[in-house]
Amino acid sequence: MEIGGPEAVKVMGGMTMLFGSVAPAVAIGWVVREAMKSIGRNPECAGDIRTTMILGAGLCEAVAIYVLLIAIILSLVA
Amino acid sequence: MEIEISLAAEPLFQIGPLTFTNSMLTSILVGLALVIGSLVLYRRGWNLVPGRFQALVEMGMEFIYNLCVATAGKKIGRRIFPLVGTFFIFILMANWGGIYPGHGSITLHNFEGHEVPLFRPANSDLNTTAAMALVSILAVQVLSINVKGIGGYIKGFFEPISIVSIILAPVHLIGEFSHLLSLSLRLFGNIFAGEVVTVVMFFLVPYVVPFAFLGLEMLFGFIQAMIFTVLSISYMALATAKHD
């Protein structure tokens, strides 16, 4: 395996996913934690809070999907 | 035996200069199914006291209508409800239509000589999602010009009036383009990555395990449709909000 060769690009694809999925996972954990706290504080609004939590988690997940796209392109197509 | 995953949608045949891809075929089929379904329902009429199916459809419609009106206010909400409702139903049906058996395995020998799958989820092609995101962002700009007038629209870019608002105006403009990019890439990435993972799972363990992944793809299809819709409504609501 040489530096910059075709196998190295595939390894880079894997490492992209390794470093890039840390931040979205932490962010989704924060969102859900705060949502659970608010449901505990105000159980009547649980439906509204649940919908907003799903929305926020989806937005954070989009960042992970951007990283996944780059990883797929690096390891399978390039 | 190898699996082939291609980022671009595979072409099926050519009519003149236009290349027809398999995701185009799926989009047309989904659109046709939705149009024919709604014509059939229109002919059946509706009762004042709804039956079960009509109650289901009304529940879905009320869900999106309440989202629109709660976020954007009653006047704007009623104006944008047809467009975002169509986004929601089309994206939902296109995502859920990628699950039935035989989806990736019915192949066709196309004009270039490769063997390509005949169907591919409509949103796993960047063209479809970029087109929808473009329509959404253009609708935001047109709605904003319509409500605020063109002077108010341009003033909106400098909106938090301060010393640095001259410098922040291009940043605001670039932010609009980033909305376009993020809307299209989010939907494309989710559905394409779901398709890749499903194909790999079917290749590795064909018998019981893919059920979990198909269920995951159904869930994510619904969530992504909802996120696209709610973000479109939020952009339109932000663009027409009156600053006091």
Image (spheres, coloured by chain):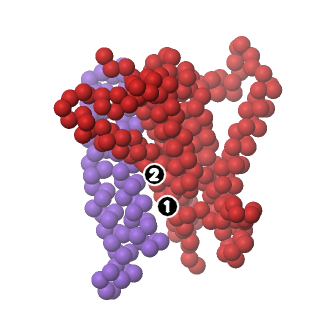
Q: What's the residue at 30%, 63% (across, down)?
A: A18
Dot 2 and dot 1 residues touching (CB under 8 Å): no
Q: Secondary structure at mark 2?
A: helix
Q: How many marks?
A: 2
Q: Return the chain for callout 1.
A: B
The residue lying furthest to the left in this view is B163
Amino acid type, callout 2: Leu
Question: From the viewer's perspective, is residue B224 above or below residue B38?
Answer: below
Q: Quadrant of residue B83?
A: top right
Amino acid type, callout 1: Val
Question: From the viewer's perspective, is residue A23 above or below residue B224?
Answer: below
Who's purple, chain-wise? A
Where residue B44 appears, as percent x and y from the top left, is: 80, 25
* Residue identifier under label 1: B197
In the displayed structure, does residue B195 sit left or right of residue B185? right
The residue lying furthest to the bottom in this view is A2
